[in-house]
Image (cartoon, grey):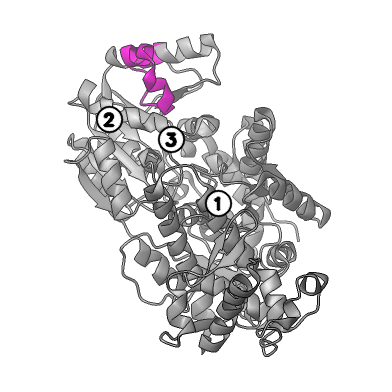
């Protein structure tokens, strides 16, 4: 027997088929979307490439076939730090699961290998680098394997946002075990990335299953940066007080600064970045998964595979490098289907910095062009005046109508004819170069347009330029918006380590009056905040319980927290919030009634059923 596991009720058998396993083990009455089709295809021995959004139930697509097919399902996952939690969650369902990775000592590995060879595991998790070891391959040769599941399959794409070189070796799976079905899964891939995944994993003949990328419960909001830390604090205090969330920053220093700022302002926050020692990173991640209401401030090194269902917001304080990365990161919010927020603060400095990083990146011209294309798509999402969600889905090749639930739908941005403003700014850049043989960043150019006699303007005699003071009709903030949008559209570029502005091939058509430039007018911040806040409260109210049931829900959460602490597992391993809400709303009086609640399978009913029924029978205070 597997140490710490319980006997699977379905190992290598098919009592009631996939639907029966879904109900008995996982506690759900029906499949979502294409889940059943994928599962039956893999049970039948077929290969599959599966794209489903985060929270769409990808894991069931390999877990159920592994329980039904003879042998052990081998899951290749890059998430060593999360394998224990993934295995704990499966064991809580009565599934015999284990893992092999570098966190185990020799004795633990030998015990796990023995369980695997004895057929006492339904699922075995491995990191991709372990498959480079011949000893691991020989181990797999000695046991019956039901399937190979390649999780986070976008990691095989060299142009993707989470490239892992060890994934390239996974093409050998088909060569060594040609009769074992393989299923590759990811939440994020364009058509090009999908084709690359299929090619690199020898899955060209696999059946593709592509679900909708839409996450309707997430509200996408992108705002101009003013004071980003203050903007973040306002978001958390007004709309997400006490909620768990993730804040992404570009640099380690920014992570530390932001986490300290939130702590000073009464928001419990933890940092996570590659500069922290491994023990601290692991401890912070464990606290985030196990405690309620914590905010994780992190670089993009954090988050892949995070199963925490009640993340209520994901905030970006810096511009993501690609739409794929943005979608993957924001998708960590609202996995439970309840309302969540994806907020991004975006400014001129972000565009300048990302352009500079591309120019300085290693690789050939084709590599830099690909990075530029990714950034251009991200900038288009930021600058759109159309539905934000429709633009996001369109990037993945999915048509969508305006959603009515993103910032551009709720508070539409207006456009204005910015041709003259664009000509003035481009002319200032041109004259600095031609007449002074100088190049400066946006701040100096804007000072010239506003007619400011700053020390630098006086030092370089910029007041004598014909463009000095010709832009006083706009504020500094508005000029920064003009510069940002010209950079986003490729009508202006940055060059060198100091982000100096230079013209592009397309600048000439604007200066010559041959091209109109429509620019985005941002709504007034106060009006936007009020509109979004009201709508946010309305969305939350729809998910609220009646007063009596709300008290029961909180008692259930308290019980769950105590049980999770006693077992040393995240609270969601016991039950998701959605399950507790349904229990509170329906107040089942018997085990038979409790068994009908979504998310309660046989193992959890046997382990927790009596405790819950007793808790529900207790008189409530007041």
Q: Is residue 552 left or right of residue 582?
A: right
Residue 171: image tag: 2
Task: Specify whether residue 525 is in view.
Answer: no
Q: Residues within 10 Å of mark 2 (few under 14, many from 20)?
A: some
Q: CA distance from mark 3 to mark 2?
A: 14 Å
User: Upstream in the sequence, badge 2 or badge 1?
Assistant: 2
Task: Specify whether residue 154 is in view.
Answer: yes
Report the residue at 48% width, 13% height from top.
109
User: Upstream in the sequence, badge 3 or badge 2?
Assistant: 3
Q: CA distance from mark 2 to mark 1?
A: 32 Å
Query: Which one is closest to the eye, mark 2 or mark 1?
Result: 1
Name the foreground residue: 263 vs 545.
263
Name the foreground residue: 432 vs 317.
432
Query: Is the residue under label 2 in contact with that under label 3 (CB below 8 Å)?
Result: no
Query: Does residue 428 lie above or below 265 as drawn?
Result: below
At mark 2, the secondary structure is: helix
Return the x and y of residue 348 as percentages of the image width and height.
61, 67
Query: Does residue 409 lie above or below 543 as drawn?
Result: below
Report the residue at 76% width, 75% height from top.
461
Return the x and y of residue 125 as percentages of the image width and height.
42, 27
Query: Is the residue under label 3 in contact with that under label 1 (CB below 8 Å)?
Result: no
Q: CA distance from mark 1 to mark 3?
A: 21 Å
Q: Is residue 611 left or right of residue 161?
A: right
Q: Which residues are magenta?
A: 114-139
Name the foreground residue: 487 vs 414.
487
User: Upstream in the sequence, badge 1 or badge 3?
Assistant: 3
At mark 3, the secondary structure is: loop
Residue 164: image tag: 3
Q: Which residue is mark 1?
A: 357
Query: Which one is closest to the eye, mark 1 or mark 3?
Result: 1
Report the residue at 63% width, 36% height from top.
274
Report the residue at 52% width, 68% height from top.
219
């Amino acid at each position: 027997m597997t140490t710490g596991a319980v006997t699977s009720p379905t190992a290598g058998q098919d009592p009631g088929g996939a639907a029966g396993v879904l109900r008995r083990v996982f506690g759900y009455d029906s499949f979502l979307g294409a889940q059943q089709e994928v599962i039956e295809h893999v049970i039948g021995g077929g290969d599959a490439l599966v794209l489903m959004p985060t929270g769409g139930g990808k894991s069931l697509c390999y877990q159920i076939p592994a329980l039904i097919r003879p042998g052990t399902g081998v899951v290749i996952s890059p998430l060593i730090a999360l394998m224990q939690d993934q295995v704990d969650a499966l064991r809580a369902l009565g599934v015999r699961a284990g893992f092999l990775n570098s966190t185990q000592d020799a004795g633990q590995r030998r015990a796990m290998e023995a369980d695997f060879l004895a057929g006492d595991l339904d699922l075995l998790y491995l990191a991709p680098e372990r498959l480079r070891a011949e000893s691991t391959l020989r181990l797999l040769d000695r046991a019956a394997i039901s399937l190979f599941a390649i999780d986070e399959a976008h990691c095989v794409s060299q142009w993707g946002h989470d490239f892992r070189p060890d994934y390239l070796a996974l093409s050998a799976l088909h060569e060594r075990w040609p009769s074992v079905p393989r299923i590759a899964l990811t939440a994020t891939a364009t058509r090009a990335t999908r084709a690359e995944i299929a090619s690199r994993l020898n899955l060209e003949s696999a059946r593709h299953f592509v679900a909708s990328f839409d996450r309707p419960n997430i509200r996408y909001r992108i705002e101009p940066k003013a004071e980003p830390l203050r903007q973040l604090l306002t978001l958390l205090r007004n709309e997400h007080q006490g909620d768990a969330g993730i804040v992404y920053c570009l640099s380690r220093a920014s992570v530390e600064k932001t986490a300290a700022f939130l702590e000073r302002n009464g928001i419990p926050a933890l940092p996570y970045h590659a500069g922290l020692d491994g023990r601290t990173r692991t401890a912070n991640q464990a606290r985030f998964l196990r405690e309620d209401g914590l905010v994780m401030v992190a670089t993009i090194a954090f988050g892949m595979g995070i199963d925490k269902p009640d993340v209520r917001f994901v905030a970006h304080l810096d511009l993501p490098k690609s739409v794929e990365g943005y979608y993957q990161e924001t998708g960590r919010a609202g996995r439970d289907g309840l309302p969540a927020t994806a907020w991004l603060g975006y400014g001129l400095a972000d565009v300048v910095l990302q352009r500079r990083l591309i120019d300085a990146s290693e690789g050939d011209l084709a590599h830099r062009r690909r990075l530029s294309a990714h950034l251009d798509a991200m900038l288009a999402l930021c600058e759109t005046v159309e539905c934000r969600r429709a633009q996001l889905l369109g990037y993945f090749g999915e048509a969508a109508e305006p959603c009515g639930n993103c910032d551009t739908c709720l508070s539409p941005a207006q456009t204005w004819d910015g041709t003259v403003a664009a000509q003035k700014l481009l002319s200032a850049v041109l004259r600095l170069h031609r007449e002074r043989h100088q190049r400066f960043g946006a701040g100096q150019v804007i000072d010239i347009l506003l007619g400011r006699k700053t020390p630098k303007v006086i030092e370089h005699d910029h007041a004598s330029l014909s463009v000095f003071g010709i832009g006083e009709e706009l504020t500094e903030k508005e000029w920064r918006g003009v510069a940002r949008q010209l950079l986003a559209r490729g009508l202006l570029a940055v060059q060198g380590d100091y982000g100096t502005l230079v013209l592009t091939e397309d600048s000439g058509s604007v200066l010559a009056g041959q091209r109109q430039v429509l620019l985005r007018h941002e709504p007034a911040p106060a009006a936007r905040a009020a509109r979004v806040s009201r709508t946010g409260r309305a969305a939350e109210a729809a998910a609220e319980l009646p007063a009596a049931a709300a008290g029961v829900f909180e008692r259930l959460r308290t019980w769950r927290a105590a049980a999770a602490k006693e077992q040393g597992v995240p609270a969601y391993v016991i039950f998701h919030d959605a399950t507790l809400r349904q229990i509170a709303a329906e107040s089942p009086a018997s085990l038979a009634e409790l068994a009908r609640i979504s998310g309660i399978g046989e193992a959890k009913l046997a382990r927790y059923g009596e405790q819950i029924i007793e808790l529900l029978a207790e008189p409530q205070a007041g």
